[in-house]
Image (tube, rainbow, N blue to C red):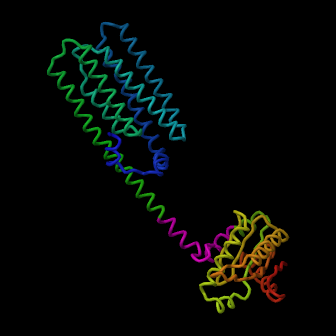
Amino acid sequence: MFRGFFSQILMDLDDLEGDYRVFHLKNDITQSILSISIATISMLGMLRTDALLFAGRPDLFMKMALYRAGFILVSIVVIFAISKTTKVRIFDRLVLGWISFAVLSILLFNFTRPANYLTTAFDIIVPFAIYALSPLKLFQNIMLAFAYSVGTLYIDHVFKFGVDPLTLSAATAAQFVVHALGLGSTLQIQSYRRKSFKAYMDEKDAKEMVAYMVNIDPLTKSLTRRHFFNMAQSEFQRFTRYRRPLSALVLDLDLFKNINDTYGHHAGDIVLRSFSLVAIEQKRVQDTFGRLGGEEFGLLLPETNLEQARVVAERIQKTWENSPVNMDGVPIRSTVSIGVAEAGEEDKSFEDLMRRADLMMYKAKERGKNRVVAE
């Protein structure tokens, strides 16, 4: 029931839940380290209170000092472990373990307090801090905060004798108030974080969609000419620096105007799209394929010499020749002429390489089309 109620208040991120936690992990780690450090310093500062409470009992003071030293040591170990973790699941376990340890330690300490020493202010800080500062899931924070309050009230009502009833009633009422305030605060904080993350992801998706639309040719789903050349320039710079093999293909569909004139421009668009899919299927992941304009395409092959590039070109040429496009039951056959060139020392820019590949493509056209010509 409670989960259903809170799920209506907090935005449900569905499949983004894991991304949401990973996105905030670095900040959660920093906040948790700061919170645990403050708690550790506070525990150290309580030694002054212990000295006053157990002024006449040095043996009890020594036990309390050892108890606080143990708490501080465990906290330091947890801080170190949290600072080294990179996984949400491990981080959650560390934080849950430390908060549970802290709650139990403080409750055990409450047994040592005199009956007339009700630290109501301190007791309401702990559950509120859990609500406001804990990066754990809401349900876990509620359980931890309630466990502390129930334990505190149980000790005050059952194990403390001679406490003024008015003071005890005020301490009890304070626990109810702090849970109302804490729950309201954590709902606001987590709701804001979730909405901010969702807005960030929506904006990121929108930017990626815009980038996709700018860089991808909408008809053929290959790279646009501009993006193809931008990526190719980076590969050519890599070739210039390391002198690794680099080859380029220029591919041009044969007699494409006849297809438009005979079957219509819609059929021509389908042929272009089909050829692009064939070429994309034949290339490797690291290869770059784009539409240069009209029925002309380019394919850049890193780590590929001239002979290897020729094999790729011939595979595309043969596959396309044997892949007629079905248009309303009518097979439309098309062929492609491909020019191949390998980057060499004489190439001062990527344009020089493409110019030579383009020249080879025109030679393929002159020699009868539907063929591959390499330097």
Residue 116: quarter of image: top left
Queried whether the magenta region covers residue 232, the answer comes back as yes
Q: Which residue occupies 32% across, 30% down?
A: 146
Q: Which residue occupies 48% across, 32% down?
A: 94
Q: Nearer the viewer, residue 167 or 343?
A: 167
Q: Quadrant of the N terminus?
A: top left
Residue 343 seen anywhere in this rendered image of the structure:
no
Residue 362: quarter of image: bottom right
Q: Nearer the viewer, residue 64 or 91?
A: 91
Is residue 281 left or right of 318 when viewed as pictured? left
Queried whether the magenta region covers residue 285, the answer comes back as no
Is residue 6 left or right of 36 when viewed as pictured? left
Question: Extreme left residue here?
Answer: 166
Q: Nearer the viewer, residue 128 or 75?
A: 128
Question: Extreme bottom residue here?
Answer: 261
Q: Which residue occupies 52% across, 36% down?
A: 90
- Give the magenta-colored segment's residue range: 206-234
Q: Which residue occupies 50% across, 28% down?
A: 77
